[in-house]
Image (tube, grey):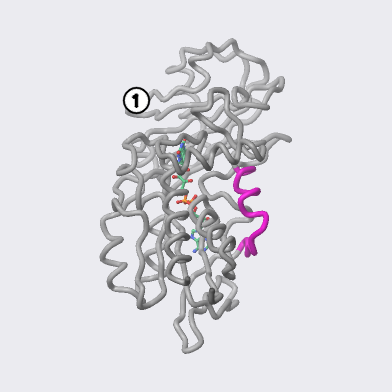
Amino acid sequence: MTQISHAIIGAGLAGLACANRLQAAGQSVDVFEKARGTGGRLSSRRRLNTTFDLGCQQLNASTPEFSQALQLWQKQGWVASHDQQTFYGLPRMSGLTRQLSSQLTLHLSTRIISLHKKVSGWWLEDEQGQQFGPYQQVTLATPVAQALPLIANHSAGLNQQLAPAEHSPCWVAYFVLPKKLAVARSDETNNVHSSYLRGWTLLNSKPAQQENVQRWVVEASAEWSKKHQDLNSQQVAQKLFALWCNDAALTIPEQPLLLEAHRWLYAFTEKSLGVAYLQDLAEGLNICGDYCLANHLNSHLGYQAEAAWLSGDKLGQQLTKVMQ
Ligand SMILES: Cc1cc2nc3c(=O)[nH]c(=O)nc-3n(C[C@H](O)[C@H](O)[C@H](O)COP(=O)(O)OP(=O)(O)OC[C@H]3O[C@@H](n4cnc5c(N)ncnc54)[C@H](O)[C@@H]3O)c2cc1C
């Protein structure tokens, strides 16, 4: 098999799935990620000597492919489950992507701002003006709004095909309560789906997460997040905390030890494409990510990570086939 050089932009679940397929087939792969760590919307944040899963809370499978991947990761100790239906990254969600990227060549803290096609192949340029290349294939594994500016001048076909896709925002509040509240098991994870809250999770209820304080994450609904998109994070944190106290019918004895908020501009796929991935074969440009398949795969929002993984994995398989 001829060795092809690949650049993958985005080290979320889709980009890592694609990269691992290609690397396993003997291809040369460089992964570029603007954040300091891998994971994208599976990332976690460290605060007060503990961590919070700020994006994806759990992994569920509706396809045999993702179900097999989860079983394998469980055997390797990368995920755990209470019931073999719902899986959690160990020791946190980003732990899974650390494992999935451990054998890959990663360029972290590297935001790619433009692509250049030269005779030698594709060159990528980052914010500092550094150039990386040449690559024969470039894959964009980012939310659609972050992929469009990179391909705008290079592929009219992909631009047109990507146009219908859309993500919605999500504000997330995360807090630490000093004392253990008595919470019914059914209230530890609650997908309320009200007009203002999407749900909440007691992080301590996940496998291997016992401790004296309680760590909570509350997700606002898309509607509420859009309405409050430009509010500052401290105001949002206070508002979401109050809404959660109200919805969970809890009287909090003391102020939280920590109360912060994070805004995901591109959180959930609102409109997806209904295809596993997209390619511009003439240009050597490829697209994968949750928004390709999500909603078509399973209408439940809890399966978007599966859509991301499947999209990247299927694209990786296709790119490998073409090279044989
Ligand atoms: C609050 C929240 C809760 C969620 N809960 C669940 C859940 O419980 N279950 C579930 O299945 N799904 C859930 N999801 C959805 C799930 O997290 C996503 O569908 C999935 O992680 C998307 O993976 P991805 O690889 O397609 O994209 P991402 O994870 O967004 O990865 C894209 C990566 O590209 C990087 N990037 C972007 N632009 C550039 C650039 N120019 N240069 C370099 N790097 C770049 C980004 O930093 C990011 O790391 C949730 C999402 C959020 C936000």
Going by the picture, which residue comes out furthest to the bottom? 119
On the image, the x and y values in percent for residue 94 come to: 61, 44
Quick check: 163 left or right of 316? left
In the image: residue 66, left or right of residue 278: right
Query: What's the residue at 46%, 75% (across, down)?
Result: 115
Toward which corner of the image does residue 223 lie, by quadrant?
Answer: top left
Q: Which residue is mark 1?
A: 194
Task: Name the quarter where the N terminus is drawn.
Answer: bottom right
Tell me the magenta residue range: 94-109
Q: Position of residue 111 (x, y in %)?
A: 55, 65
Which residue sits at x=60%, y=22%? 205
Q: Closest to the observer: 196 or 161?
A: 161
Q: Amino acid at mark 1?
A: Ser
Whether residue 235 is visible? no
Whole-percent x, y for residue 309 in the image: 47, 48
Q: Is residue 282 above or below residue 14?
A: below
Magenta-drawn stretch contains 79: no
Q: Nearer the viewer, residue 172 or 324?
A: 324
